[in-house]
Amino acid sequence: MEKTGLKVLVHASAFFAPFLVPFVLYLVIDDSEIKRLSIQALLFQLVMGALIFISAILIIFLIGIPMLIVFILMTIIVPIIGIVKALGGETYNYPIVGRWI
């Protein structure tokens, strides 16, 4: 049960401390599955932050508006999917960065 709670915490941290919680859990927890999930969550937040920043710059050319909407929705929906999967006891890999780790 502790593992499930930690997985939910890593996914839910996207809404209150997207960089701090995965980093601290990576340093503190010895479980390899939690470490992998923490790195994925951290990388996902970094990549999405960069994509949102680039989309915000591209708003000048109007192409950034749909990109910005999609990336913001992904930043909200993907952690929720991860929480549901963690509560169900399933393994979840983040899109974009899931295969890097």
Image (cartoon, rainbow, N blue to C red):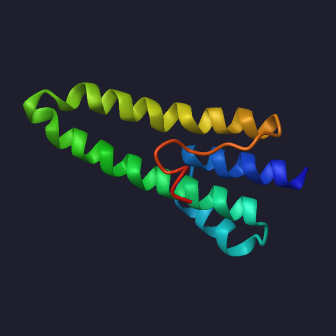
In the image, taking residue 10 as reference, residue 58 lies left or right, namely: left
In the image, taking residue 83 as reference, residue 46 lies left or right, namely: left
Q: Position of residue 47 (x, y in %)?
A: 39, 52
Q: Position of residue 22 (x, y in %)?
A: 61, 60
Q: Residue furthest left?
A: 61
- Residue positioned 31% across, 42% down in the render: 52
- Residue positioned 63% across, 59% down in the render: 38
Q: Position of residue 81 (x, y in %)?
A: 63, 32
Q: Position of residue 92 (x, y in %)?
A: 67, 42
Q: Residue furthest front?
A: 99
Q: Residue furthest right?
A: 1
In the image, taking residue 32 as reference, residue 69 lies left or right, namely: left
- Residue positioned 40% across, 46% down in the render: 48
In the depicted structure, whether residue 62 falls above or below residue 53: above
Quadrant for the C terminus, please: bottom right
- Residue positioned 59% across, 67% down in the render: 23
Give the image quarter of residue 25: bottom right
In the image, taking residue 17 as reference, residue 11 lies left or right, namely: right
In the depicted structure, whether residue 81 falls above or below residue 50: above
In the image shown, does 71 or 14 lie closer to the viewer?
A: 71
Give the image quarter of residue 6: bottom right
Q: Please tell me how many numbered marks the rendered image carries.
A: 0
Give the image quarter of residue 82: top right
In the depicted structure, whether residue 63 falls above or below residue 3: above
